[in-house]
Image: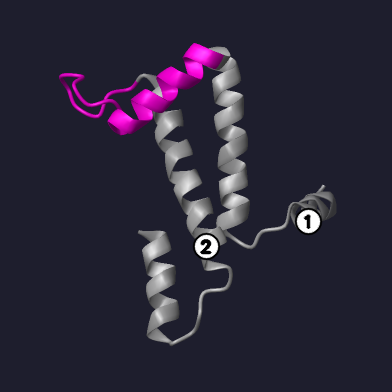
Amino acid sequence: PVVLLVAGWHYFWCRTLPAGYTKTVGAITLLLCVAALLGLTGWSASSEGSVPAGGHLGAVLASLAVQYLNRTGGAIVILSLGILGVILTTQVSLSALAALAGEKA
């Protein structure tokens, strides 16, 4: 919903979205990573346990990650890809975040 809101805002004001393809790839990556992380938790969205928390796609991605990388390795890779998705979707800079954290510390 947030991505659709931002895209709608830009289309409403007739502005082009800068780096639209990069933001789309980042948003899809972020969506898949969140689903896979929720699938790794093992929670269920329904009381019967028929629907996993990350949906069926998240359960499939989580099982593939566990099968090939074990649970900890899968979580590390999925988190790393999620951070990459955030960087691609937003215009956040890791160096600016590190400088801000250094100032606050």
Q: Is residue 17 magenta?
A: no
- Residue 22: name its quadrant: bottom right
Mark sitting on residue 100: 1
Question: Is residue 54 shown above or below 24?
Answer: above
Percent coordinates x, y for residue 38 in the rendering: 40, 30
Percent coordinates x, y for residue 104 in the rendering: 79, 52
- Per the image, label 2 sits on a secondary structure element best described as helix
Number of numbered discs visible in the structure rendering: 2
Residue ID for mark 2: 21
Q: CA distance from mark 1 to mark 2?
A: 29 Å
From the viewer's perspective, tell me whether residue 77 is left or right of residue 56. right
- Residue 84: name its quadrant: top right
Quadrant for the N terminus, please: bottom left
Q: Residue furthest bottom?
A: 14
Q: Nearer the viewer, residue 82 or 97?
A: 82
The residue under label 1 is which amino acid type?
Answer: Leu
Q: Is residue 66 magenta?
A: yes
From the viewer's perspective, tell me whether residue 46 is left or right of residue 60. left
The residue under label 2 is which amino acid type?
Answer: Tyr
Q: Which range is magenta?
A: 43-68
